[in-house]
Amino acid sequence: MTAALDPGTLARALLSIARERLDPQTVAGELEEVTKALSSVSLLKRTLSDPGLPAEERRSIVSDVLGGLFSPVTLGLVDLLIDENLVDSVGAVASAYRRLLDEDRGMVRARVTSAVELSAGDMEALRAGLTEKLGGHVVIEQDVDPGILGGLIVQVGDTVLDGSVAGRLRRLREELDAPAPAGAEASPAVAPETPQAPAGPSATPPGE
């Protein structure tokens, strides 16, 4: 992929066109819907990505299947990606476009994954903490994944902060599996100390 056609460059060009012809937020929503459609209908994605089919035929399929659903701005992007055999990049363009639009509006979008759904109070506390660190207006998108066991995974743009229990266990396992440095001697095993009962009378609870 040339620099002129990388997702960030395409997203900036698309945002410029959207500002002139349409509400940029509308295009953002359409890009997300196109991405979902290609992900959920594998036959459509394979067909539009097939370089063995003439680009004109693939553009005709887009017009027939998606023409009545999306604006000419969004359909124009899909046609361009077909011409350049970059249909697989539509999701990356959609993500880059959303980030640019958020920056324009002073918004920071954070995707938070937790083992259970966060309460309204937890969400507000998390939003306040992220706002203090990141600035701007923080929008939280929550995912629930019991597999992380506990804690949180926070993703802002390309940065991922893994504070989950599963993540900590994985890092611990990696540390334990790492080979010892050459020449290092194993530390002798030390028997754990037996806890000693505190000397003297027990502490009196406050107020007694």
Image (cartoon, rainbow, N blue to C red):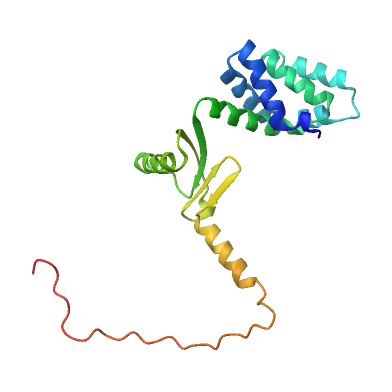
Q: Residue at x 81, y 25 (%)?
A: 82
Check the picture and name the quadrant holding the C terminus: bottom left
Q: At which x and y percent is residue 130?
A: 44, 42
Q: Quadrant of residue 40?
A: top right
Q: Is residue 191 left or right of residue 103?
A: left
- Tell which residue pokes out farthest to the top in this image: 21
**In-front residue for pair 30/144:** 30
Q: Residue at x 50, y 54 (%)?
A: 163
Q: At which x and y percent is residue 96?
A: 64, 32
Q: Is residue 35 left or right of residue 43?
A: left
Q: Residue at x 79, y 22 (%)?
A: 80
**In-front residue for pair 5/192:** 5
Where is 206 relative to 92, above or below?
below
Asked whether residue 40 appears in the rendered view, the answer is no
Q: Quadrant of residue 132?
A: top left
- Tell which residue pokes out farthest to the left in this image: 208
Asked whether residue 77 appears in the rendered view, the answer is yes
Where is 156 relative to 168, above or below?
above
Where is 192 relative to 156, above or below?
below
Q: Residue at x 37, y 87 (%)?
A: 194
**In-front residue for pair 152/118:** 152
Q: Is residue 65 left or right of residue 195?
A: right
Q: At which x and y percent is residue 50?
A: 86, 30
Where is 15 relative to 117, above or below?
above
Check the picture and name the quadrant holding the N terminus: top right
Q: At which x and y percent is residue 101?
A: 57, 26
Number of numbered tags placed on the structure image: 0
